[in-house]
Image (spheres, helix red, strand yellow):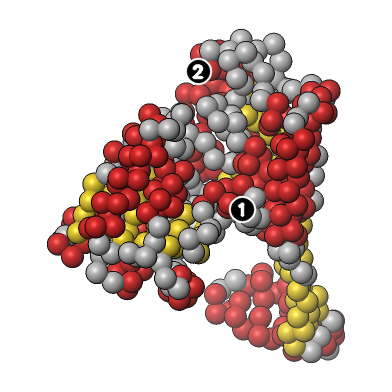
Amino acid sequence: MQTLLWSQLNETERRAALSRPTALANIDVGDILDEVRKDGDAALFALTKKYDGVDLNELRVPQTAFKKAWDTLLAADKFALKTAKANIEKFHKAQMPKSIHVDIMEGLVCSRIARALESVGLYVPGGSAPLVSTLMMLAIPAKIAGVGKIIITTPPQKGGEISDALLACAYLCGVTEVYKIGGAQAIAALAYGTQSIEKVVKIFGPGNAYVSAAKAQVASEIGGPAIDLPAGPSEVMVLADDQANPVFVAADMLAQAEHDPLAQVICVCRSEAFSNRVEMEISNQLIALPRKDIASKALAHSKTIIVDDSKTMLEIVNTYAPEHLIVQVKNPDTLLPDIRNAGSVFLGQWTPESVGDYASGTNHTLPTFGAAKAYSGLVLESFMKFISVQSLTKEGLKSLGPVVERLADMEGLDAHANSVSVRLETLS
């Protein structure tokens, strides 16, 4: 890891220190999208063989597989899934929006009403690590929101099957439509529809660079689906003073680094001595990790930044806008009011980022690559939309109509004015 003294960097060097990996640039998935749009299921079979090395006989997981997977799960695993599900449900049910009805003026009422999305596609990574946590984070709020149709796509394993853990989790969450398809081709299937997979109105879920590029492209097409967030590789920023536990800090950094070679890990601390202790702990803990090769590649472009005070820490946080922000300083609550840009915050030494990934109840689908400056992580409302309603009585139109006529005249839109005028004439 690179160690930087913030006070000794100029503005250009500071921008470079907070830059993201550039490997996402110039990824072209256009040919894959076009192939699926043109050939449907046939393209999905061919692309799965080409990119995953799997010859599929069918795309959809049979109904009988879900209950079977749940029944064969260890009791301890069932308990863990049920506990996580209960916490996620509790936090997301509390987010249920209320309808708004406002008496604007005499004879005029305006309302906002919520409606669940008709259909969603949930992309669940399942290659090197079948992410049951992602399935829960997407399927549970979709169910609570009342989404009519929920489709899951996830890459097949080498034998053409889907992880029993994923299928058991889908069973627990009440989702039965799961397809063995991954990569950009899965996003294309959800965006355009095929003979087997129905087109959806919004696509959710993290993925590799090709999945992210595909999501961005289909969302930019006229008539294309919405997507949850602009996404890049996972990232964490840890704020630590000299009283922080370097063992904890190192463990948190490695937890993020093992995700992906492009994952970014940054520690912002107060002294070179603490930085050295963290670096030593990372080396010690890395040795025992099965995914140490992936973590090592991520650490190669990660950084430790040494600053003089908490104010500078906060400036770096709000400039970088991390997906995950871990605050391991004395009295961490005092920094929270000044944190403006972060996907999810983990306060205090007893709050590892992993609890948010799995079971605290908050959603782990979060904005990356600096998108936390403008985007929130997934919430219940991500699976809903809102319709505005207005209702006028005769008296209301008498009061408001002349205002609308005047404004329409100012814009030169005579038909707009006339739609009010013809009504007012019948009331005179």
Residue occupying the point 22% across, 58% down = 272
Is 380 or 272 nearer to us in this picture? 272
Q: Earlier in the sequence, mark 2 or mark 1?
A: 2
Q: Which residue does the image show at 48% across and 60% down from the upper left?
A: 349
Q: What secondary structure is marked by label 1?
A: loop
| Residue 7 shown left or right of residue 98 in the figure | left
Q: Amino acid at mark 2?
A: Tyr
Q: Is residue 139 above or below residue 375?
A: above
Counting from the top left corner in percent of width and height, residue 17 is at 25, 52
Q: Pinpoint residue 38: horizontal percent, then vertical percent.
A: 59, 21
Residue 338 image offset from top left, x and y in percent: 43, 74
- Quarter of the image holding residue 312? bottom left
Determine whether, in the image, residue 195 is placed left or right of residue 297.
right
Figure disc tally: 2
Kind of residue at disc 1: Asn
Q: Nearer the viewer, mark 2 or mark 1?
A: 1
Residue assigned mark 1: 363
Tell me which corner region of the image, top left, top right, bottom left or bottom right, holds residue 292.
top left
The secondary structure type at the circle numbered 2 is helix
Q: Is residue 315 visible?
A: no
Above or below, comparing residue 90 to residue 122 in the picture: below
Residue at image location 77% in from the left, 65% down from the top: 113
Crowding near pointer 1: few (<14 within 10 Å), some, many (20+)?
many
